[in-house]
């Protein structure tokens, strides 16, 4: 990975100054070690920013910041509700962050072959997760017996529908259909989500709220209509700024212009920056490195960069807003 970010062999280090200096080139915003007096002053002045970020992490379904103990027990299943993981927002695999529709997908199942959560990964990434990490979904930590590859509809339509039917009821609701579209159809899923109510009525005239197999993947089914009606959309990330160009790198990956990168957004950005998409073992190593330093530096990084760059981001937002009105 060159000299931009040399991953240490250790996985823990109590000397935070050393860690901060070691990783500063790769993580924008960490301009000074956190125990520097000036840096502490900036952090103390940004308590509202930190509190908002902690709240977002608490509510977000993340590969590391997952459901806390005080939440309802049913929330751990990952079978619906809650915020989307950053990989789902971008229609990507939650391990390698490459487009899901480029490869065969897989789901996690229990000993009886039933889905344990609503998430899709690439088949190879799901198998590697079981081998290197453990028997659980890396996005929601739902425990599983194994990963199960999802066949293409042309191979085995019945098995495809069974595995995509998260609840095992022989039907799919709107949330499940959108989840399948995000994972397997290279179109703008957000646009389809906005149009879904009007599209749905054609296949569900009695307004039951669910569709059966033929309604979803039949010759005249919803997925066929969506694929034909909506243009293909698959983003390729090119000309990524080098991680040592901290300001440009941060701005490039802050795609929602929030002025902040959450932990999984940082992991995604580093994986794409270093081209690790085919190397699951190194992806897991990088994820561990980010996790090990995040709780010591994460809030400081967020606060320092948010305070230093607030005017810049507000100007960008205003400029984009003016363009939208034209």
Image: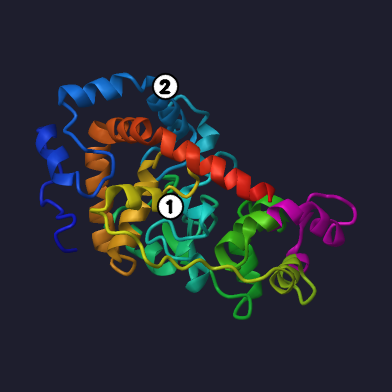
287 up-or-down from 318: above or below: below
Q: Secondary structure at mark 1?
A: loop
> Can residue 126 be seen by looking at this rendering?
yes
Which residue is drawn at the image coordinates 55% and 45% (left, top)? 319
Looking at marks 2 and 1 on the same chain, the residue that comes earlier in the sequence is marked by 2
**Residue 85: percent from left, percent from top:** 48, 47
In terms of image quadrants, where is residue 272? bottom left
Foreground residue among 172 and 325: 325
Query: Which quadrant is home to the N terminus?
Result: bottom left
Tell me where residue 27 appears, x and y as whole percent: 26, 45
Number of the label disc, if any, that sits on residue 40: none
Q: Position of residue 69 (x, y in %)?
A: 42, 27
Number of disc labels: 2
Q: Main secondary structure of the magenta part?
A: helix
The quarter holding residue 19 reads top left
**Marks 2/1: CA distance?**
38 Å
Residue at the image position 61 percent from the left and 44 percent from the top: 321
Q: Nearer the viewer, residue 12 or 5?
A: 5
Q: Is residue 26 left or right of residue 263?
A: left
**Does residue 131 appear anywhere in the picture?**
no
Drawn side of residue 140 relative to residue 19, left or right? right
Q: Which residue is mark 2?
A: 48
Residue drawn 63% across the image and 80% down it: 154
Pointer 1: what residue? 144
Q: Write the start and end of the magenta stretch as one range.
A: 192-215
- Crowding around mark 2 (Cα neighbors within 10 Å: few <14, some 14 to 19, many 20+) is few
């Amino acid at each position: 990975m060159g000299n931009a970010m040399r991953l240490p062999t250790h996985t823990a280090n109590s000397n935070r100054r050393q860690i901060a200096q070691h990783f500063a080139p790769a993580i924008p915003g960490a301009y000074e070690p956190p125990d520097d007096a000036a840096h502490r002053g900036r952090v103390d002045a940004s308590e509202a920013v930190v509190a908002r970020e902690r709240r977002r992490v608490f509510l977000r379904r993340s590969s590391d910041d997952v459901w806390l103990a005080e939440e309802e027990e049913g929330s751990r299943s990952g079978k619906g509700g809650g915020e989307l993981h950053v990989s789902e927002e971008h229609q990507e695999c939650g391990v390698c962050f490459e487009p899901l529709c480029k490869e065969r997908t897989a789901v996690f199942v229990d000993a009886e072959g039933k889905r344990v959560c609503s998430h899709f990964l690439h088949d190879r990434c799901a198998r590697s997760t079981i081998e290197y990490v453990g028997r659980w979904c890396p996005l929601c930590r739902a425990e599983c017996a194994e990963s199960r590859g999802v066949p293409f509809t042309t191979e085995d339509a019945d098995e495809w529908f069974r595995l995509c039917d998260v609840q095992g009821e022989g039907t799919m609701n709107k949330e499940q259909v959108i989840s399948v579209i995000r994972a397997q159809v290279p179109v703008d899923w957000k646009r389809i989500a906005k149009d879904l109510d009007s599209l749905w009525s054609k296949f569900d005239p009695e307004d039951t709220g669910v569709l059966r197999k033929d309604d979803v993947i039949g010759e005249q089914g919803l997925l066929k209509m969506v694929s034909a009606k909506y243009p293909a959309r698959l983003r390729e990330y090119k000309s990524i700024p080098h991680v040592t160009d901290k300001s440009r790198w941060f701005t490039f990956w802050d795609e929602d212009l929030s002025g902040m990168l959450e932990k999984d957004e940082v992991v995604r950005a580093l994986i794409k920056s270093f081209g690790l998409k085919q190397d699951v073992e190194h992806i897991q190593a990088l994820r561990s490195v980010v996790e090990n330093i995040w709780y010591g530096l994460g809030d400081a990084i967020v606060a320092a960069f948010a305070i230093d760059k607030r005017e810049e981001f507000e100007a960008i937002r205003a400029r984009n807003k003016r363009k939208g009105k034209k």
